[in-house]
Image: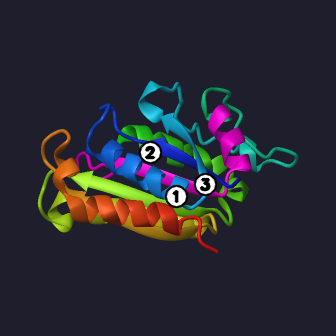
Amino acid sequence: MSKAIVLLGSPRRRGNSEILADRAMEGITAAGGACDVFRLNTMKIRPCQACDYCRRDGHTLCAIHDDMDTIYAALSESDVILLACPIYMFTITAQLKLFMDRCYACPGLLAGKRVGILLTYGDTNEHTSGAINAMNTFRDEYRYAHADLVGIVHASAGGKGEIATNEKALEEAFLLGKALFKD
């Protein structure tokens, strides 16, 4: 069975981005995939120290040993990465940024993976909310890593749980989940 790792980048449980992630995971399951979920806010992940240990001969991963080790192991066994995140201060959350920065140590683990992105924001505009900044960050990171960015679903949702009434966003998340496992 094909595997996806799902990274929840919100500090809020059952918030808008997690609701979208749940719907995308239904799509993954419908397409025959399985999911390992990581709630980044509850994990101990230190920031990259720019030591370049991972770039020295004979080293393939980070010198820091923390909960990223668990994610690195899951990445090595997965075909798909699904990231779900609200927009905070015009870009991705600190929790998700820690994960992305620590992936500097393992671009080979990202290469060839199929990636899906789910974003929510309180503003009604993708430009003034910062969603465009986040989308560009994802496009740049996964292009650098030679991963296949399959799609980005983004939607406005101000209050906690509000996204649950957005049928269009929920359907797009489901379809993205299914698309992540198409050949």
Determine the secondary structure under disc 1: helix
Amino acid type, label 2: Lys
Q: Which contiguous range is marked in magenta?
A: 70-92
**x 52%, y 35%: residue:** 47
Q: Compared with residue 150, is residue 55 higher up or lower down, i.e. above or below? A: above
User: In the picture provided, is 3 more to the left or to the right than 168?
Assistant: right
Q: Which of the numbered marks, if any, corresponds to residue 33?
A: 3
Q: Which of the numbered marks, if any, corresponds to residue 30?
A: 1
**Foreground residue, 57 or 140?**
140
Was residue 89 drawn as part of the magenta stretch in this picture?
yes
Q: Percent x, y for residue 94?
A: 38, 39
**Foreground residue, 26 or 102?**
26
Amino acid type, label 3: Gly
Q: Percent x, y for residue 136?
A: 38, 67
Q: CA distance from mark 1 to mark 3?
A: 7 Å
Determine the secondary structure under disc 2: helix
Q: Are marks 3 and 2 in contact (CB under 8 Å)?
A: no
Q: Earlier in the sequence, mark 3 or mark 2?
A: 3
Q: Percent x, y for residue 158?
A: 13, 47
> Is residue 136 something that shows in the picture?
no
**x 48%, y 40%: residue:** 98
Colour mapping: rainbow
Determine the secondary structure under disc 3: loop
**Which residue is identified by label 2?**
97
Q: CA distance from mark 2 to mark 1?
A: 29 Å
